[in-house]
Amino acid sequence: MKKETPMMAQYNKIKRENPGVMLLFRLGDFYEMFGDDAKDAARILGITLTKRNHGGTTDTPLAGFPHHALDRYAHKLVKAGKRIAVCEQMEDPKKAKGVVKRDVVEIVTPGTGMDQTYVADRENTYIVSLYFHTKGFACAICDISTGEFQCQDGEFSLLEECLMRVDPAEILIPQGMADSAHEKRLTEWFPKATLSFAETGRYRVDRSQRVMQEHFSLSSLHGLGFEGRDELLIASAVLLEYLRDMKRNPLQHISKIEFMGDSRYAQLDPASIRNLEIIHPLLGGQEGGTLLSVLDKTVTVLGARLLKKWLVRPLRIPREIEERLDAVEWFKDTLMVTTKIRELLRRVYDLERCITRIVLGRASARDIVALRISLEQFPQLCDALQDVPCGEIQKCTSLLSGFEQLCEYISTTLVDDPPVSLREGGLIRAGVDSVLDEYRDISHNGKDWIARLQQEEKEKTGIDSLKVGFNKVFGYYLEVSKVNIAKVPDYFIRKQTLANSERYITPELKEVEEKVLTAEEKRGDLEYALFTELREYIATRCEAIQGAAQGIARLDLFSTLGHLAMENQYIRPSIRETGDLHILGGRHPVVEEMTDAAFVPNDTHFIEDTSQFFVITGPNMAGKSTYLRQNALIALMAQVGSFVPAQKAEVGLVDKFFTRIGASDKLARGQSTFMVEMIEVANILHNATDQSLVLLDEVGRGTSTFDGISIAWAVAEYLHNTPGRRPRTLFATHYHELTELAMLLTRVENYHIAVRKHEGKILFLRKIEKGSSSHSYGIEVASIAGIPAAVTDRAQEIMQNLESMEFDSYHRPRLAQETETVPSAAEDRAEMQLDFLQGVGEEHPLLEKIRQIDVSRLTPLDALNTLAEMQNML
């Protein structure tokens, strides 16, 4: 049996130390993969799979790619769900004794990518750590590329909502929970997320305390926010430790933890985020069609990411909402300044991810130039906004000051257009370091001298074809063709013989070569050292730059919302701490933008004590769903701090948004339409409050008519009558029986979508009017949809039979026969009707008695006495 080679022994050792990952092993100018890793990589990347014997009894599968293609290929592997470990050469192979030292410098997973290759500019990439306990869950959330770190806890019922707000790329749970109910539920909720596991032993309070104390350089955790919250401490520490393991770095850019309290934000359950199409369209894959797509006119990636966070976290604290609205209003009213601000903001790069790369020692010179260009915009932004009487804008500009010295340092150190590689040289400006300038002079002049030497030797020897060359093996040399060998002088020392020429060196050439090459190497090393010194200094300003990034993001968002308010004729909403909701001339922000026709505005007036529950009837295609959604979106936009599409809006704060619209998103999970509907309705009935806003569209449609009406009616009664569970409710339905609720329940009102018939065709007016609709126009809508006339004509006959109570003699609806062949109902009744007064003549006293009864004055007791008298007369 052959013994494995030293290199393969090194590979196998590193592979054992990093289980569960694909190892990218640096060999010279390539990254190589072996065994099963090679097979997987060849399949995913479409690269050649070969075999080679490395000392074993069989050949080892082998695949690889050039080192400069790492980012491109690594991204494909991670996207395919692989966890990859990058193993680098830790020393110069020329200086190595034996096998070159190698080690893993980074592990990349779907939730821990940091470079632009792995993350989308306008989106966050989150990894989530979960810890389950008897009372619920604790959750830590991090985007390692920006340094954002949050934590939140709650009951199990809030878990999906919590996670859906961040849409995690990776979820970390204890190893002991593999194949558990929690794992299956997480996989069902987020099928695209990678599920990772941490050792169970890490989930201990004492270990978690040590991890957090070390990271934040604290002797105690008092004041950090974890007092009495051990579960949150564990979830956060496990995540932090996992990230440090992946990056082999202390992650100093994660400098604070934000606790996400429920009291500050309105609740958006997962169904509402989907059904309102806030971030993604219901029909996945298409561009646009969401509230995000309408509002995202931001000019920085920082603002774009912040907008997405705001939309799924509407505020419920009036003061904070009003402060945002003040800032938006100022930008709306100052067109020229807003235009200037947005132009300046366009020149600001992704500061969050830039400072992360700098702190982790991964930034290129071009990253730092981008930082400098961004910092250069700050003074102009502050000057343009210095006299603004708005607290939120002043907070933003206060975060942009104090960077003049840093900007000057970068500007005077780095050239304006540095090379991509940090080892090529050409990064540092002349005059920054005298020693570097000396090396450059030697290098530059040495090359000039070599050129002069070549000319001198040509003249001395008379060999016109003589030339000076260079390679890594021999250094500089003089090359003479074979035909001129006789002219070679004695001081030429032969170094190499080729087919058509000879290569020589001279003592003078080697002397200059040593000076030039030494200077080149020292110049490169010194340039890199000066660059590293600059990068490390910038890293000390990490927190300040992260704060500036937040200020830029908010300025971008405020100016964008102000710009949109002016462009789309949005108005400032009034925020009220009541259960009212008054919208005059409200419009759907997405439908309005996507349609060419003029949008028909509608009003809504919820009054806490008198108008709480609206039953809305009308045909499909008329605009019921649009009307429902637009009211929720207007309320949500208001609580985000945006102006809204309406003529006037008074928004009583919503604590929770609920929607029950459609079920296609869960059908693939094996749940029936009706089951999905009932689960979502149950969630509403259990969790809605008097301050909530509920949209219910066609509750009960997934079962039989009588079952559906019964359930819908009972749901309506519950939401109207149950103390503490009386939300503002928009209830769209085709069950016209539900309109009778308005006669029985004091806070129920009927509305319908106006429809007009013209020359046998229906016109959808898209207007909400008070009162109920008497017709669903389903057959007309079917005709518009292209159903054959033979079908719609027959449907019309059947409907007429049903509406006129056409039953046969056995009380069955006359559906099977065409109208003209069916005996009339009167004829049927004549055949089977028993004569109540059979055998009683026209002059019988009983008839006279009946004619004399005044029914309107008859009391129940009188009725019984009269009936007894009539009985005696028969």
Image (tube, grey):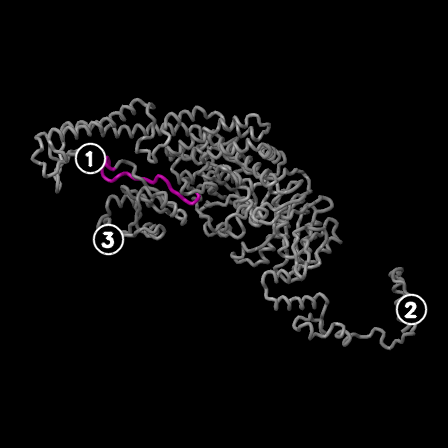
Instruction: Point out the frontmost of discs 3 and 1.
Output: 1
Which element is circle 3 on?
loop
Q: Quadrant of residue 135?
A: top right
Between residues 295 and 737, which one lies in front from this camera angle? 295
Position in image of residue 408 (x %, y %): 41, 24
Between residues 203 and 288, which one lies in front from this camera angle? 288
Location of the C terminus by quadrant is: bottom right
| Residue with the mark numbered 3 | 57
Q: Which mark is residue 849?
A: 2
Position in image of residue 812 (x %, y %): 69, 71
**Dot 2: within a 10 Å radius of its alpha carbon, few (fewer than 14), some, or many (20 or more) residues?**
few
The answer to whether the residue labelled 3 contacts the one labelled 2, judged by CB atoms less than 8 Å apart, is no
Which element is circle 1 on?
strand
| Residue with the mark numbered 1 | 470
Residue 398 lies left or right of residue 27; in this view the side is: right
**Is residue 90 at least partly visible in the picture?**
yes
Q: Residue visible at 64% across and 38% down?
A: 573
Residue numbers of the magenta segment: 93-111
Q: Amino acid at mark 3?
A: Thr
